[in-house]
Amino acid sequence: MATAEAHIDVHAHDDHHDDHHEQSFISKYIFSMDHKMIAKQYLITGIIWAIIGAALSAIFRLQLGFPEADLGWLRPILGKWISAEGALDPEFYLALVTMHGTIMVFFVLTAGLSGTFSNFLIPLQIGARDMASGFMNMLSYWFFFIASVIMLISLFIETGPASGGWVVYPPLSALPQAMSGSGLGMTMWLVAMVFFIASSLLGGINYVSTVINLRTKGMTFSRLPLTIWAFFLTAVIGILSFPVLFAAALLLVFDRSFGTSFYLSEIYIQGEALPNVGGSPILYQHLFWFLGHPEVYIVLLPALGITSEIIATNSRKPIFGYKAMIISMMGITFLSFIVWAHHMFVSGLNPFLGSIFMFLTLIIAVPSAVKVFNYLTTLWKGNIIFTPAMLFSIGLVSVFISGGITGIFLGNSAIDIQLHDTYFVVAHFHLVMGAASSFGLLAGVYHWFPKMFGRMMDTKLGYIHFWLTFIGIYSVFFPMHYIGIAGFPRRYYSFTNFDAFSGFTDLNMFISIAAIATFIGQFIFLFNFFYSIFRGRKAPANPWNSTTLEWTTPRVPGHGNWPGEIPKVYRWPYDYSKPGAEEDFIPQTVPFSQTMESNLPHENDEIALEKEMEAEEIVVVDANKH
Amino acid sequence: MAENYKLVDAPVEQPLSMHPKKFALWLFIVTVVMIFAAFTSAHIVRQADGDWLIYDLPSMLWYTSGIIILSSVFMQWAYIAAKKDKLEQVKLALGITTILGILFLFGQLKAWEQMVDANVYFTGNPAGSFLYIFTGIHALHLISGVIYLIYMLISSLRNKVHSENMLNMEMSSTWWHFLGGLWIYLFIFLLLNH
């Protein structure tokens, strides 16, 4: 290992050498290979996508809440999608729903969340100079960028973007005759997703090999912060599931453009038979949900990891059940691959298979509940410091519980017959996946902003932002449960055409107002974020008195992260408020030999190991000198 | 895609664990396995639905399978020779492997011609389409392998492939053996299920 460090130091020296030459603007900010800059690129791109995605939802909420309203004032943005009478075009409504889902799931909560924090935190928290491959990392961002550009352009083409729902089920998505969005818009959707998958895989391969190969001395797997465990398992899920989406998309491309019949069976359109024979649209659903379900955890796990870290730090307590947390994350990872058919209970699935998938689905409640209990018991009797990051983390636990409980309803194949494709489902996954992951993302930004930009975000604005968001999210999604139980299907353009179905007009209006207010509330965050980058109070190196390695770097870590040697790790990352210790936190870099007053009996045994480790190192360094 | 990790600037040597690039290659292999796992599962699911065209596998596939096994043998020879610093043997073995790889690709193309002659087209009943997908996507990956082999051949002609510089040799042989193994899996799968 010592040889490795010697090499790394030489490498770091080279980098330093480069700095003297002043990196050009392009190699520093655009085609950067530095993991911290790539993380910021992901974050900013993710934020832009979040604004677009949320704006789309604001538009379709206007339609759902105020179906009779004159939307003519939106014509400057939406152009011909607003009819002469000021009504939203029904096909474009479907496009809005589709693009909102695609953007939020893939571009914001996969790339924006995982891309930002895996990139930023993995090298900093495991003690590495950079990712295993800076070039692959750069490529990963730029593939994502290409995907972004294509997806963005598809919003503005004449036939409209993809409109078949974010799951793009064939035959709706496979036949351009089906709807205008299934033409060019769908093609661009598929092309963008191919680039997106390539980006995710490049990123994921990099994260996994960095965590496995580049940990600093002493950083064993049992000393990894839970954030890293979460990012690691997320990357593993991505590596195993995204190729399957790739395969599904590829077959769809062949069906659309080359006339094959993987998903298309005998279809008549306006009395004329299509040439396709013998395809199976259910096949697509199997392939899609084999990615689609793990994707939920790709989105959620990083947020849970971030929350573990923030809750432990701001409760000034060790995380409760460190090993249980890891085991439950592994359990979730494993189970995420064998539950996909619970999305297909009403697709004509064999009821016997349905009960198997129901059983497996309900098992996921166990590791999820373990995690929730561990968060609560970590908070229990802690010296809680309510930073905005902490509030968002506690908010995550809240929405994770209320959204997770409805998952138990939906996981039952019998109840699902009633609830499938209603607003109940929308409420469920927006709380447990959408809101929980967004809260994790926001918590992470508030918590690690000082390390990203060397400045603090404004706390008061953070509080206002949190309470607006928290109340807003519940006002939007809680009422949706009632609408769903009443049987209102999702993705419908309007419910007021028949008196029998206009019972929830008021509630829909309330949801729309709450949604738009929540959306506007996010601009407080945006202002805070961008203002603080340039004008925020300068941050100390370790503003939250945290134990993990990233806080041992300078205020703004340069290329190579640590100016000198990479610090060594001697203890787990959650030594907060240890009885006997002088301060209420002991960084991972402090050896047990220096904390005799707070050591537990078994930790005193570690001192001998520490000495051995150091003696060994001297021998190796000596050997290297020859 | 397969070449990405090749272009990477050399990361730091880690004596205690697998080289990061090699590890990344294994992870990439996992993703390729998942793609073909998806295709072959799709084949099984779709076949179980009935309405399935039965056709004869092109006889050419037997020959190409033989070629790919033979190429793996020569690849292994190149690897062992490089380890023993027998540079002339490395060049010869790598050259033969490359030629066999290209031959395999032509063989697959011939197999497609045989399919067309038997009136089984890319469009139409998915039974036939799946064969084109398996062979086509596999061939795309194999092309990346051939490019890697050509790169290795050029390095070996410059005497850069030897026991002190085995990383690329190890990675290219891993990749090539994997591609060969993948084809054998697909071929056996098709034999059993077509």
Image (cartoon, coloured by chain):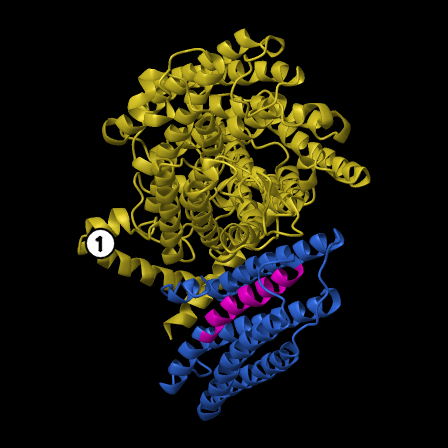
- Find chain A in the image and tell me its colour: yellow
Who's the residue at 57% across and 71% down the image?
B179
Magenta-drawn stretch contains A458: no
Who's the residue at 39% across and 50% down the image?
A143
The blue one among the chains is B
Q: Is disc 1 placed on a helix, strand or loop?
A: helix
Q: In this view, does B144 lie to the left or right of B59?
A: left
The magenta segment = B127-146
Residue A391, x across and y down, in percent: 48, 21
| Residue behind mark 1 | A19
Residue A543, x across and y down, in percent: 37, 30
Q: Quadrant where the C terminus of chain B lies?
A: bottom right
Is A350 in front, or is A375? A350
Q: Is residue A9 left or right of residue B127?
A: left
Residue A333 visible to an observer of this rendering: yes
A417 shown above or below A2: above
- Mark 1, residues whose alpha carbon is within 10 Å: few (<14), some, or many (≥20)? few
Q: In this view, does A89 lie to the left or right of B38?
A: left
A505 shown above or below B168: above
User: Residue lying farthest front?
Assistant: A271
User: Residue lying farthest right?
Assistant: A352
